[in-house]
Image (spheres, rainbow, N blue to C red):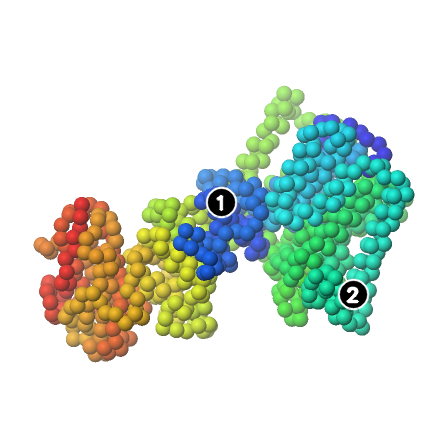
C-alpha cells in the first residue's frame, strides 16, 4: 500500500514492545474478570469440563443449558457444548495453571485470555503496517489507535470468541501478504496463512466470511488490466450504493413507508420469511449506519478508512480497497441474514460480531493516518482528527468503566429492557456513552481492583503504562533507554517478564476472595474443602439452583463434578413471592429436564451430593430438590460447615431407589410397633436386602401412620446394634421424610414413607445385627416416646423384627 518499502528489521520492533507495555498498563487497569453474558458463561464451563474431565459437557451451566430428556442418557446426562473447540483449548493452560496455583481464581485466570489476544492483535497489526512499507511512527499510531480507540479495548475484558477470531484472520492476512512479498515462494508464510485461517474457523465458523477478502489479498496488485480493475471497482461501488440507499431511505422515511410489501417481495428471493427480512434490514442498518451500534459509531476512529480508501484508489491500489469492502459488507450481510433474531449478540457492546473487521479498517486507514503522522496534511484537518480521536477514546472509556448490564436499567420503559432497542442505537439521547456516564459515582466501577479495594493494582498499572510511554518516546527518537550500565541493563530487560508475571500473580491473589463470586464466604469454602476430601472423580455435587453457581465457577476443584440444576418452579424464593407451581408430588415441583437429569446422574453413581441454599430455618421455602431426593432416594447425612450458615447445607444421598410412594404398595415387613399412643410404625422395607459389606450403605424405608392427631413434632433416631446391645453405628437424626412430613401435620390413618440411610463402618466386626428405632420430641430431645409392641429395649427403643448380616 505504501509507495516505499523499508526492510523489516529487529530494530524496528523496539517501539512495539513499548506499545504493548502501554496497552498492558491500560488493559490490566480495566481488567474486571466479570462474566458478562450467557455466551461467555457457557464457554468458560466448557473450558472447565475440558480441563477437569476431558469432555465439553455443560455441568455448571446445566441450569442455562438443560439436557434434552429425550436424548440424555446415564452415560451422557449433560448437554455438550455446541461450539468450535479452539476457544476452549487455548485458554485451558490458564485454567490448569490457576488450578495448581494457590490463591488464584479460575475465572480470574481465564479472563486474562482476551487481554493476551488483544495485545497479539495489536502486535500483528504493527508487523503488518511495517510489512506494507510504512514507518515505525505510523505503525505505532495504528497500533495505539487499534488498542485504545476501538472496541478491541472493551473486548479485552471479556471471554467472547471474536478477539481470537480477529487475531487469526489478521494473522492469516499477514501471512498471505508476506507470502506475496516472497513472490509466492515462502512455504512458511503460506503455511502460516493456512494454519491461521484454519484456527479462525475452529474458533468461529463465521470466519469463513473473511475468505473472499483473503482471496482478493492473494492476487497480485496489478494482475488485472487497469480497465478490468476499474470495472470491478465500479460494480462493487454501485452495489454498495444500492445497499446503502436501501438501508438509509427506509430509515429516514420509516414513519411514512410501509415496508411490509418490500419484505414480502424479497422473501422468496432470499429464501427467508418477511419477518426475517425485516430483522436482517434492522441488523444491516445497525451494523453499518446506526450512530450507536455500527462499526464507525462505536469505533469512530475507523472513519479514517474513508479518506484512506480514497487515497488507495487514487494511487491505483485496488486490492486493499476491495478487501476492506468485502470484509465489511461480507460480515455485515452474512450475520444479518444468518443470525436471525440473535443478530445483536446478546449482552455485548455493539457491533460484537463485526469485531474481526476492525483491524482491516485500520489497514485501510493507513494512507490517511500516515499523512497525519508525518504532518503532510493541511493544518485545518488536525483539529477534526483530534476530535475524532478523543470521541473514540471517550466511547471506549465508557465501555470499560461499568458493567454492560447497567445500560438497560437507564433506558426508558419503551425499551423493554432490550440492549438492541432501536432508540438506544439511533437516538443520540439514549446512546450508551451518553447514559452510562450518568451512573459514574453512583454505580460500582467494573474494575477488579476497585471491587476488591486493591489500591496498589491501579498504581502499578499506571506506572507500567508511563514507563512504556517514555520508552516509546525515546525509541521513536532513536535514543537508547539506558539508566543502568550496559551489562546490568541487559540483565534488567531479561527480568522484565519475570517481574510482570510476579506482579500479575500477586494481583490475582489479592482479588482471590472476590465478592462477585462469593469468595469471601468461609462456609462455602469449608463445604468445598469437605467435598474434595470426601468425594472421588465420579462423584457429583448438585446445586439446588444457581445461587452458588459462580462460586464454583471460580473456586471449583476437579471433584466432585458440580451440576447446577435449573431454578425449580415449585420453589418460593421469599415469603412475599408465591411459587409458580404447587403440588404434593415433588416431581411436579421441578421442570421435566431436571427430573430426567437427576435420575440419569443417579443411575451411574452410588451417591449424590446436594448443596442447598434454603433449609428448615426458612419456613416459607418449599425446597423442591430436597423433597424430590428424599422421596426417590435415601438421605445419608447433612455435613456441618464452619462457620455454620443456614444457607449453606451440604447433604449426601444414597442413590438406591426408594419405594414409589404412589404405587399403592405397602412395606415388605410388617410390625406392630407403637410410639406413645399416637404413632404406629406399620412396617419397613430394606431395599438392599439383609446382607451388607463393610463400608456400604444400609437404606431403610419406614412406613408410618398416625393413630390420632399428634400435638408435637418428633425426630427419628435409628441405630445398628449387636445382639448384646452394643451400638455399631447411628444414622443421621432427622424428622420423618427429612422434615417434610412433620408429625404434627400427619393425618390420621394416612400412611407415609420415611426414607433414610447410613453408611456401615469399614472396621465393623462381621456378624448379625439388629436395627433400633427411637423417637424424641424435636424441641426437647430428652422427651423420649415410650415403645409398645414387639421387642423393646429400655422402654424407648423399638427393635425391628429383622436381622442384618455384615459380611467381611
- Confirm whether residue 483 shows in the render: yes
When the figure is inspected, residue 638 is found, relative to residue 389, above or below; the finding is below
Residue nearest the viewer, comparing 750 with 737: 750
Quarter the C terminus occupies:
top left
Query: Could you say where residue 256 lies in the image, as x and y percent from the top left?
Result: 80, 73
Residue nearest the viewer, comparing 161 with 238: 238
Asked whether the beta carbons under mark 2 and mark 1 sit within 8 Å of each other, the answer is no
Disc marking residue 363: none
- Confirm whether residue 25 shows in the render: no
Q: Residue at x 38, y 45 (%)?
A: 537
Residue neighbourhood size for the residue with mark 2, other residues' Cα within 10 Å, grouped as few (<14), some (14–19), many (≥20): some
Disc marking residue 50: 1
Q: Residue at x 25, y 76 (%)?
A: 750
Query: Could you say where residue 479 lies in the image, as x and y percent from the top left?
Result: 75, 28
Q: Residue at x 67, y 62 (%)?
A: 420
When the figure is inspected, residue 68 is found, relative to residue 525, above or below; the finding is below
Residue neighbourhood size for the residue with mark 1, other residues' Cα within 10 Å, grouped as few (<14), some (14–19), many (≥20): some
User: SS of the residue at dot 2?
Assistant: helix
Q: Residue at x 25, y 73 (%)?
A: 751
When the figure is inspected, residue 152 is found, relative to residue 172, above or below; the finding is below
Residue nearest the viewer, comparing 485 with 770: 770
User: SS of the residue at dot 1?
Assistant: helix
Query: Could you say where residue 641 lies in the image, as x and y percent from the top left?
Result: 35, 54
How far apart marks 2 and 1 lie (CA) works out to 46 Å
Residue 91 falls in image quadrant: top right
Q: Which residue is mark 2?
A: 251
Query: Could you say where residue 704 lies in the image, as x and y percent from the top left?
Result: 22, 70
Amino acid at each position: 500500500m505504501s509507495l516505499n518499502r523499508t526492510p523489516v528489521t529487529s530494530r524496528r520492533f523496539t517501539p512495539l514492545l513499548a506499545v504493548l507495555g502501554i496497552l498492558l498498563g491500560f488493559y490490566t487497569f480495566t481488567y474486571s474478570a466479570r462474566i458478562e453474558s450467557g455466551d461467555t458463561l457457557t464457554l468458560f464451563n466448557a473450558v472447565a469440563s475440558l480441563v477437569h474431565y476431558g469432555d465439553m459437557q455443560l455441568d455448571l451451566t446445566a441450569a442455562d443449558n438443560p439436557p434434552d430428556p429425550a436424548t440424555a442418557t446415564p452415560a451422557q446426562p449433560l448437554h455438550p457444548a455446541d461450539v468450535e473447540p479452539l476457544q476452549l483449548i487455548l485458554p485451558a493452560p490458564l485454567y490448569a495453571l490457576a488450578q495448581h496455583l494457590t490463591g488464584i481464581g479460575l475465572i480470574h485466570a481465564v479472563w486474562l485470555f482476551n487481554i493476551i489476544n488483544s495485545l497479539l492483535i495489536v502486535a500483528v497489526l504493527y508487523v503488518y503496517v511495517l510489512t506494507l512499507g510504512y514507518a515505525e511512527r505510523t505503525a505505532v499510531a495504528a497500533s495505539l489507535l487499534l488498542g485504545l480507540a476501538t472496541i478491541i479495548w472493551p473486548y479485552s475484558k471479556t471471554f467472547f470468541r471474536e478477539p481470537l477470531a480477529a487475531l487469526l484472520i489478521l494473522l492469516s492476512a499477514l501471512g498471505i501478504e508476506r507470502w506475496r512479498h516472497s513472490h509466492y515462494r515462502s512455504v512458511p508464510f503460506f503455511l502460516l496463512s493456512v494454519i491461521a485461517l484454519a484456527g479462525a474457523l475452529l474458533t468461529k465458523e463465521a470466519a469463513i466470511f473473511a475468505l473472499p477478502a483473503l482471496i482478493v489479498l492473494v492476487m497480485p496488485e496489478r494482475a488485472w488490466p487497469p480497465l478490468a480493475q476499474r470495472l470491478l471497482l465500479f460494480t462493487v461501488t454501485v452495489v454498495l450504493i444500492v445497499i446503502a440507499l436501501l438501508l438509509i431511505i427506509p430509515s429516514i422515511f420509516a414513519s411514512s413507508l410501509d415496508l411490509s410489501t418490500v419484505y414480502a417481495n424479497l422473501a422468496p428471493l432470499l429464501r427467508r420469511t418477511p419477518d426475517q427480512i425485516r430483522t436482517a434490514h434492522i441488523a444491516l442498518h445497525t451494523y453499518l449506519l446506526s450512530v450507536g451500534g455500527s462499526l464507525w459509531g462505536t469505533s469512530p476512529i475507523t472513519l479514517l478508512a474513508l479518506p484512506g480508501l480514497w487515497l488507495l484508489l487514487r494511487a491505483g491500489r485496488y486490492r486493499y480497497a476491495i478487501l476492506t469492502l468485502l470484509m465489511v459488507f461480507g460480515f455485515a450481510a452474512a450475520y444479518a441474514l444468518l443470525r436471525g433474531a440473535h443478530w445483536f449478540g446478546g449482552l455485548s457492546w455493539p457491533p460484537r460480531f463485526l469485531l474481526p473487521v476492525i483491524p482491516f479498517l485500520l489497514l485501510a486507514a493507513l494512507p490517511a493516518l500516515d499523512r497525519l503522522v508525518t504532518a503532510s496534511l493541511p493544518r485545518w484537518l488536525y483539529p477534526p482528527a483530534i476530535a475524532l480521536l478523543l470521541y473514540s477514546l471517550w466511547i471506549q472509556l465508557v465501555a470499560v468503566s461499568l458493567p454492560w448490564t447497567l445500560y438497560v436499567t437507564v433506558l426508558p420503559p419503551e425499551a423493554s429492557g432490550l440492549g438492541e432497542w432501536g432508540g438506544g442505537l439511533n437516538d443520540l439521547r439514549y446512546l450508551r456513552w451518553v447514559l452510562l456516564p450518568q451512573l459514574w459515582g453512583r454505580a460500582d466501577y467494573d474494575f477488579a481492583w476497585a471491587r476488591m479495594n486493591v489500591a496498589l493494582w491501579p498504581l502499578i498499572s499506571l506506572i507500567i503504562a508511563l514507563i512504556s510511554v517514555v520508552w516509546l518516546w525515546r525509541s521513536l527518537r532513536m535514543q537508547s533507554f539506558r539508566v543502568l550500565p550496559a551489562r546490568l541493563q541487559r540483565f534488567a530487560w531479561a527480568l522484565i517478564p519475570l517481574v510482570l508475571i510476579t506482579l500479575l500473580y500477586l494481583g490475582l491473589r489479592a482479588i482471590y476472595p472476590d465478592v462477585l463470586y462469593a469468595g469471601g464466604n468461609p462456609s462455602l469454602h469449608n463445604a468445598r474443602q469437605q467435598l474434595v476430601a470426601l468425594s472421588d472423580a465420579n462423584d457429583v455435587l448438585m446445586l439446588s439452583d444457581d445461587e452458588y453457581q459462580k462460586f464454583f465457577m471460580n473456586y471449583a476443584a476437579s471433584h466432585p463434578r458440580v451440576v447446577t440444576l435449573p431454578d425449580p418452579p415449585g420453589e418460593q424464593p421469599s415469603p412475599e413471592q408465591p411459587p409458580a407451581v404447587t403440588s404434593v408430588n415433588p416431581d411436579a415441583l421441578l421442570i421435566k429436564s431436571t427430573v430426567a437429569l437427576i435420575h440419569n446422574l443417579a443411575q451411574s453413581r452410588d451417591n449424590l451430593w446436594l448443596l442447598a441454599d434454603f433449609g428448615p430455618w426458612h419456613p416459607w421455602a418449599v425446597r423442591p430438590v430436597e423433597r424430590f431426593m428424599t422421596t426417590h432416594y435415601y438421605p445419608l447425612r447433612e455435613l456441618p460447615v464452619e462457620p455454620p450458615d443456614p444457607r449453606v447445607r451440604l447433604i449426601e444421598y444414597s442413590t438406591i431407589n426408594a419405594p414409589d410412594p404412589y404405587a399403592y404398595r405397602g412395606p415388605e415387613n410388617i410390625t406392630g410397633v407403637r410410639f406413645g399412643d399416637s404413632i404406629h410404625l406399620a412396617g419397613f422395607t430394606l431395599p438392599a436386602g439383609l446382607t451388607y459389606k463393610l463400608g456400604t450403605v444400609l437404606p431403610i424405608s419406614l412406613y408410618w401412620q398416625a393413630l390420632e392427631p399428634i400435638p408435637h413434632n418428633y425426630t427419628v433416631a435409628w441405630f445398628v446394634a449387636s445382639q448384646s446391645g452394643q451400638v455399631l453405628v447411628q444414622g443421621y437424626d432427622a424428622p420423618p421424610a427429612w422434615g417434610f412430613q412433620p408429625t404434627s401435620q400427619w393425618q390420621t390413618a394416612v400412611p407415609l414413607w420415611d426414607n433414610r440411610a447410613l453408611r456401615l463402618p469399614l472396621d465393623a466386626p462381621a456378624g448379625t445385627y439388629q436395627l433400633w428405632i427411637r423417637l424424641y420430641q424435636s424441641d426437647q430431645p430428652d422427651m423420649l416416646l415410650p415403645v409398645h409392641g414387639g421387642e423393646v429395649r429400655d422402654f424407648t427403643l423399638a427393635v425391628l423384627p429383622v436381622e442384618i448380616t455384615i459380611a467381611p
